[in-house]
Image (cartoon, grey):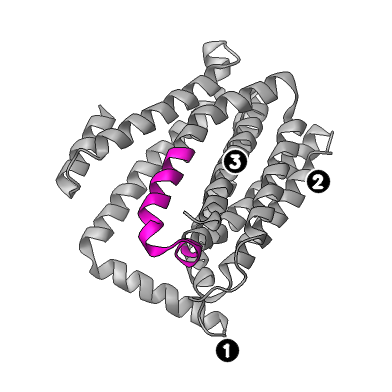
Amino acid sequence: MNRYAVQLISRGAINKIGNMLYDYGNSVWLASMGTIGQTVLGIYQISELVTSILVNPFGGVISDRFSRRRILMSTDLVCGILCLSISFIRNDSWMIGALIFANIVQAIAFAFSRTANKAIITEVVEKDEIVIYNSRLELVLQVVGVSSPVLSFLVLQFASLHMTLLLDSLTFFIAFVLVAFLPKEEAKVQEKKAFTGKDIFVDIKDGLHYIWHQQEIFFLLLVASRVNFFFAAFEFLLPFSNQLYGSEGAYASILTMGAIGSIIGALLASKIKANVYNLLILLVLTGV
Protein backbone atom coordinates (compact mmCIF):
# COMPACT_ATOMS: atom_id res chain seq x y z
CA MET A 1 0.00 0.00 0.00
CA ASN A 2 1.07 3.60 -0.59
CA ARG A 3 1.69 6.02 2.25
CA TYR A 4 -1.69 7.70 1.75
CA ALA A 5 -3.45 4.45 2.57
CA VAL A 6 -1.31 4.14 5.71
CA GLN A 7 -2.29 7.71 6.66
CA LEU A 8 -5.99 6.89 6.32
CA ILE A 9 -5.63 3.72 8.40
CA SER A 10 -3.73 5.71 11.04
CA ARG A 11 -6.45 8.34 11.04
CA GLY A 12 -9.11 5.68 11.54
CA ALA A 13 -7.23 4.20 14.51
CA ILE A 14 -6.56 7.61 16.07
CA ASN A 15 -10.20 8.64 15.68
CA LYS A 16 -11.44 5.42 17.26
CA ILE A 17 -9.18 5.95 20.28
CA GLY A 18 -10.39 9.54 20.60
CA ASN A 19 -14.05 8.58 20.28
CA MET A 20 -13.68 5.91 22.94
CA LEU A 21 -11.95 8.33 25.32
CA TYR A 22 -14.66 10.91 24.71
CA ASP A 23 -17.69 8.63 25.05
CA TYR A 24 -16.30 6.62 27.96
CA GLY A 25 -15.15 9.64 29.94
CA ASN A 26 -18.33 11.66 29.41
CA SER A 27 -20.71 8.75 30.03
CA VAL A 28 -19.00 7.58 33.23
CA TRP A 29 -18.76 11.14 34.56
CA LEU A 30 -22.45 11.84 33.89
CA ALA A 31 -23.55 8.45 35.27
CA SER A 32 -21.63 9.14 38.50
CA MET A 33 -23.89 12.12 39.25
CA GLY A 34 -26.64 9.89 40.66
CA THR A 35 -30.32 10.43 39.84
CA ILE A 36 -29.75 13.64 37.90
CA GLY A 37 -27.07 11.81 35.94
CA GLN A 38 -29.68 9.47 34.47
CA THR A 39 -31.64 12.40 33.06
CA VAL A 40 -28.58 14.25 31.81
CA LEU A 41 -27.08 11.12 30.22
CA GLY A 42 -30.39 10.50 28.45
CA ILE A 43 -30.38 14.05 27.07
CA TYR A 44 -26.71 13.65 26.13
CA GLN A 45 -27.38 10.49 24.11
CA ILE A 46 -30.65 11.69 22.58
CA SER A 47 -29.02 14.91 21.39
CA GLU A 48 -26.54 12.86 19.37
CA LEU A 49 -29.15 10.49 17.94
CA VAL A 50 -31.61 13.19 16.89
CA THR A 51 -28.87 15.32 15.34
CA SER A 52 -27.50 12.32 13.43
CA ILE A 53 -30.96 11.46 12.08
CA LEU A 54 -31.51 15.02 10.87
CA VAL A 55 -28.05 15.63 9.40
CA ASN A 56 -26.94 12.22 8.06
CA PRO A 57 -29.03 12.46 4.84
CA PHE A 58 -27.03 15.57 3.88
CA GLY A 59 -23.61 14.01 4.57
CA GLY A 60 -23.42 11.89 1.44
CA VAL A 61 -24.73 14.65 -0.80
CA ILE A 62 -22.18 17.18 0.47
CA SER A 63 -19.24 14.75 0.23
CA ASP A 64 -20.18 13.98 -3.39
CA ARG A 65 -20.08 17.63 -4.39
CA PHE A 66 -17.19 19.09 -2.39
CA SER A 67 -13.58 18.26 -1.56
CA ARG A 68 -13.54 15.23 0.78
CA ARG A 69 -10.10 16.25 2.03
CA ARG A 70 -11.31 19.70 3.07
CA ILE A 71 -14.40 18.23 4.71
CA LEU A 72 -12.26 15.88 6.82
CA MET A 73 -9.81 18.63 7.74
CA SER A 74 -12.59 21.04 8.70
CA THR A 75 -14.46 18.56 10.88
CA ASP A 76 -11.30 17.36 12.65
CA LEU A 77 -10.17 20.94 13.33
CA VAL A 78 -13.56 22.08 14.65
CA CYS A 79 -13.93 19.05 16.94
CA GLY A 80 -10.34 19.39 18.18
CA ILE A 81 -10.75 23.06 19.10
CA LEU A 82 -14.11 22.34 20.74
CA CYS A 83 -12.79 19.52 22.96
CA LEU A 84 -9.73 21.58 23.87
CA SER A 85 -11.92 24.52 24.92
CA ILE A 86 -14.25 22.36 27.02
CA SER A 87 -11.34 20.73 28.84
CA PHE A 88 -10.67 24.03 30.68
CA ILE A 89 -14.19 24.25 32.18
CA ARG A 90 -14.22 23.58 35.93
CA ASN A 91 -17.86 24.30 36.80
CA ASP A 92 -19.96 21.10 36.71
CA SER A 93 -23.14 22.81 35.51
CA TRP A 94 -21.30 24.50 32.67
CA MET A 95 -19.53 21.25 31.86
CA ILE A 96 -22.86 19.41 31.47
CA GLY A 97 -24.14 22.02 29.02
CA ALA A 98 -20.83 22.09 27.16
CA LEU A 99 -20.75 18.30 26.76
CA ILE A 100 -24.28 18.24 25.34
CA PHE A 101 -23.43 21.09 22.95
CA ALA A 102 -20.19 19.37 21.92
CA ASN A 103 -22.07 16.13 21.33
CA ILE A 104 -24.43 17.89 18.92
CA VAL A 105 -21.55 19.56 17.07
CA GLN A 106 -19.63 16.28 16.82
CA ALA A 107 -22.72 14.46 15.54
CA ILE A 108 -22.97 17.04 12.75
CA ALA A 109 -19.25 16.78 12.02
CA PHE A 110 -19.31 12.97 11.95
CA ALA A 111 -22.29 12.99 9.56
CA PHE A 112 -20.08 14.71 6.99
CA SER A 113 -16.69 13.17 7.84
CA ARG A 114 -17.99 9.58 7.86
CA THR A 115 -19.19 9.72 4.25
CA ALA A 116 -16.24 11.85 3.12
CA ASN A 117 -13.81 9.32 4.60
CA LYS A 118 -15.45 6.45 2.72
CA ALA A 119 -15.45 8.42 -0.52
CA ILE A 120 -11.84 9.57 -0.32
CA ILE A 121 -10.57 5.99 -0.08
CA THR A 122 -11.09 5.46 -3.81
CA GLU A 123 -9.20 8.69 -4.49
CA VAL A 124 -5.95 7.85 -2.67
CA VAL A 125 -5.87 4.03 -2.57
CA GLU A 126 -5.09 2.07 -5.73
CA LYS A 127 -8.04 0.04 -7.02
CA ASP A 128 -6.21 -3.28 -6.72
CA GLU A 129 -5.21 -2.46 -3.13
CA ILE A 130 -8.65 -1.55 -1.75
CA VAL A 131 -9.34 -5.10 -0.52
CA ILE A 132 -5.97 -5.18 1.29
CA TYR A 133 -6.65 -1.71 2.67
CA ASN A 134 -10.06 -2.72 4.06
CA SER A 135 -8.73 -5.89 5.67
CA ARG A 136 -5.84 -4.07 7.36
CA LEU A 137 -8.09 -1.22 8.47
CA GLU A 138 -10.52 -3.69 10.03
CA LEU A 139 -7.68 -5.49 11.81
CA VAL A 140 -6.31 -2.23 13.23
CA LEU A 141 -9.75 -1.05 14.34
CA GLN A 142 -10.45 -4.37 16.06
CA VAL A 143 -7.18 -4.20 17.99
CA VAL A 144 -7.91 -0.59 18.96
CA GLY A 145 -11.45 -1.57 19.91
CA VAL A 146 -10.13 -4.11 22.42
CA SER A 147 -7.48 -1.85 23.95
CA SER A 148 -9.28 1.53 23.95
CA PRO A 149 -11.71 0.78 26.82
CA VAL A 150 -8.78 -0.19 29.04
CA LEU A 151 -6.91 2.99 28.09
CA SER A 152 -10.04 5.08 28.74
CA PHE A 153 -10.51 3.47 32.15
CA LEU A 154 -6.90 4.12 33.15
CA VAL A 155 -7.00 7.77 32.04
CA LEU A 156 -10.26 8.47 33.88
CA GLN A 157 -9.19 6.48 36.94
CA PHE A 158 -5.79 8.10 37.41
CA ALA A 159 -6.42 11.51 35.80
CA SER A 160 -9.77 13.21 35.19
CA LEU A 161 -12.48 14.01 32.66
CA HIS A 162 -10.49 17.09 31.67
CA MET A 163 -7.52 14.92 30.70
CA THR A 164 -9.71 12.66 28.53
CA LEU A 165 -10.99 15.77 26.72
CA LEU A 166 -7.43 17.03 26.23
CA LEU A 167 -6.35 13.67 24.80
CA ASP A 168 -9.44 13.58 22.60
CA SER A 169 -8.60 17.02 21.20
CA LEU A 170 -5.06 15.79 20.54
CA THR A 171 -6.40 12.84 18.50
CA PHE A 172 -8.45 15.25 16.36
CA PHE A 173 -5.41 17.46 15.71
CA ILE A 174 -3.31 14.42 14.76
CA ALA A 175 -6.09 13.28 12.40
CA PHE A 176 -6.15 16.80 10.90
CA VAL A 177 -2.41 16.64 10.16
CA LEU A 178 -2.71 13.16 8.61
CA VAL A 179 -5.43 14.37 6.23
CA ALA A 180 -3.57 17.61 5.46
CA PHE A 181 -0.76 15.58 3.87
CA LEU A 182 -3.11 13.70 1.53
CA PRO A 183 -3.08 14.72 -2.17
CA LYS A 184 -4.78 18.07 -2.77
CA GLU A 185 -6.14 17.03 -6.15
CA GLU A 186 -9.23 14.82 -6.03
CA ALA A 187 -9.94 13.50 -9.50
CA LYS A 188 -13.47 12.28 -8.89
CA VAL A 189 -14.88 15.36 -7.20
CA GLN A 190 -17.70 16.70 -9.36
CA GLU A 191 -16.93 19.63 -11.59
CA LYS A 192 -17.61 22.98 -9.98
CA LYS A 193 -20.99 24.32 -10.99
CA ALA A 194 -23.87 26.31 -9.57
CA PHE A 195 -25.01 24.59 -6.39
CA THR A 196 -28.18 25.37 -4.46
CA GLY A 197 -30.01 23.93 -1.48
CA LYS A 198 -32.54 22.48 -3.93
CA ASP A 199 -29.84 20.21 -5.36
CA ILE A 200 -29.35 18.62 -1.94
CA PHE A 201 -33.02 17.72 -1.60
CA VAL A 202 -33.16 16.44 -5.18
CA ASP A 203 -30.26 14.08 -4.43
CA ILE A 204 -31.90 12.93 -1.19
CA LYS A 205 -35.18 12.34 -3.04
CA ASP A 206 -33.38 10.24 -5.66
CA GLY A 207 -31.73 8.19 -2.90
CA LEU A 208 -35.04 7.55 -1.13
CA HIS A 209 -36.67 6.61 -4.44
CA TYR A 210 -33.90 4.07 -5.09
CA ILE A 211 -34.21 2.53 -1.61
CA TRP A 212 -38.00 2.29 -1.87
CA HIS A 213 -37.77 0.33 -5.13
CA GLN A 214 -34.99 -1.95 -3.85
CA GLN A 215 -37.13 -4.06 -1.54
CA GLU A 216 -34.29 -6.09 -0.04
CA ILE A 217 -32.35 -2.95 0.91
CA PHE A 218 -35.53 -1.39 2.32
CA PHE A 219 -36.19 -4.51 4.41
CA LEU A 220 -32.63 -4.54 5.76
CA LEU A 221 -32.94 -0.88 6.75
CA LEU A 222 -36.15 -1.65 8.64
CA VAL A 223 -34.45 -4.54 10.45
CA ALA A 224 -31.44 -2.36 11.29
CA SER A 225 -33.66 0.42 12.66
CA ARG A 226 -35.46 -2.00 14.99
CA VAL A 227 -32.21 -3.53 16.20
CA ASN A 228 -30.80 -0.06 16.86
CA PHE A 229 -33.93 0.81 18.85
CA PHE A 230 -33.16 -1.91 21.40
CA PHE A 231 -29.42 -1.25 21.36
CA ALA A 232 -30.10 2.40 22.24
CA ALA A 233 -31.67 1.32 25.54
CA PHE A 234 -28.81 -1.12 26.16
CA GLU A 235 -26.17 1.54 25.52
CA PHE A 236 -27.99 3.94 27.83
CA LEU A 237 -27.68 1.48 30.72
CA LEU A 238 -24.05 0.50 30.08
CA PRO A 239 -22.42 3.59 31.67
CA PHE A 240 -24.18 2.71 34.94
CA SER A 241 -22.39 -0.67 35.06
CA ASN A 242 -19.88 0.63 37.61
CA GLN A 243 -22.72 1.49 40.01
CA LEU A 244 -24.74 -1.66 39.28
CA TYR A 245 -21.84 -4.05 39.88
CA GLY A 246 -20.00 -1.98 42.48
CA SER A 247 -16.77 -2.06 40.48
CA GLU A 248 -14.91 0.87 38.93
CA GLY A 249 -13.79 -1.20 35.94
CA ALA A 250 -17.11 -2.89 35.11
CA TYR A 251 -18.00 -0.58 32.21
CA ALA A 252 -14.52 -0.84 30.64
CA SER A 253 -14.58 -4.65 31.03
CA ILE A 254 -17.95 -4.91 29.29
CA LEU A 255 -16.74 -2.73 26.40
CA THR A 256 -13.57 -4.82 26.06
CA MET A 257 -15.54 -8.08 26.04
CA GLY A 258 -17.87 -6.57 23.46
CA ALA A 259 -14.91 -5.71 21.23
CA ILE A 260 -13.52 -9.25 21.60
CA GLY A 261 -16.96 -10.61 20.73
CA SER A 262 -16.99 -8.44 17.60
CA ILE A 263 -13.68 -9.95 16.48
CA ILE A 264 -14.98 -13.49 17.04
CA GLY A 265 -18.22 -12.61 15.27
CA ALA A 266 -16.35 -11.18 12.29
CA LEU A 267 -14.30 -14.37 11.99
CA LEU A 268 -17.41 -16.57 12.16
CA ALA A 269 -19.34 -14.33 9.78
CA SER A 270 -16.75 -14.91 7.07
CA LYS A 271 -17.66 -18.62 7.17
CA ILE A 272 -21.42 -18.05 6.88
CA LYS A 273 -23.13 -17.54 3.55
CA ALA A 274 -24.43 -13.98 3.23
CA ASN A 275 -28.20 -14.00 2.71
CA VAL A 276 -31.31 -12.63 4.41
CA TYR A 277 -32.30 -16.01 5.89
CA ASN A 278 -28.99 -16.43 7.73
CA LEU A 279 -29.20 -12.81 8.88
CA LEU A 280 -32.60 -13.42 10.47
CA ILE A 281 -31.33 -16.60 12.17
CA LEU A 282 -28.42 -14.66 13.66
CA LEU A 283 -30.80 -11.94 14.87
CA VAL A 284 -32.95 -14.56 16.61
CA LEU A 285 -29.86 -16.03 18.28
CA THR A 286 -28.84 -12.52 19.36
CA GLY A 287 -32.22 -12.06 21.03
CA VAL A 288 -31.88 -15.40 22.82
The tag earlier along the polypeptide, 2 or 1, is: 2
Q: Which mark is residue 173?
A: none
* 153 to 64, vertically: above or below: above
Q: Which mark is residue 194?
A: 1
* 15 to 233, vertically: above or below: below
Q: Pointers 1 and 3 in contact (CB under 8 A)? A: no
How far apart in space, not on screen, are marks 1 and 3 (Cα)?
Answer: 36 Å
Q: Pointers 2 and 3 in contact (CB under 8 A)? A: no
Q: Position of residue 277 (x, y in %)?
A: 15, 45
How far apart in space, not on screen, are marks 2 and 3 (Cα)?
Answer: 17 Å
Q: Which mark is residue 19?
A: 3
Q: Amino acid at mark 1?
A: Ala
Q: Residue at x 38, y 46 (%)?
A: 135
Query: What range of the chain is rendered magenta?
Result: 119-140
Label 1 residue SS:
loop
Q: Position of residue 98 (x, y in %)?
A: 74, 44
Q: Which mark is residue 85?
A: 2
Q: Amino acid at mark 2?
A: Ser
* 186 to 59, vertically: above or below: below
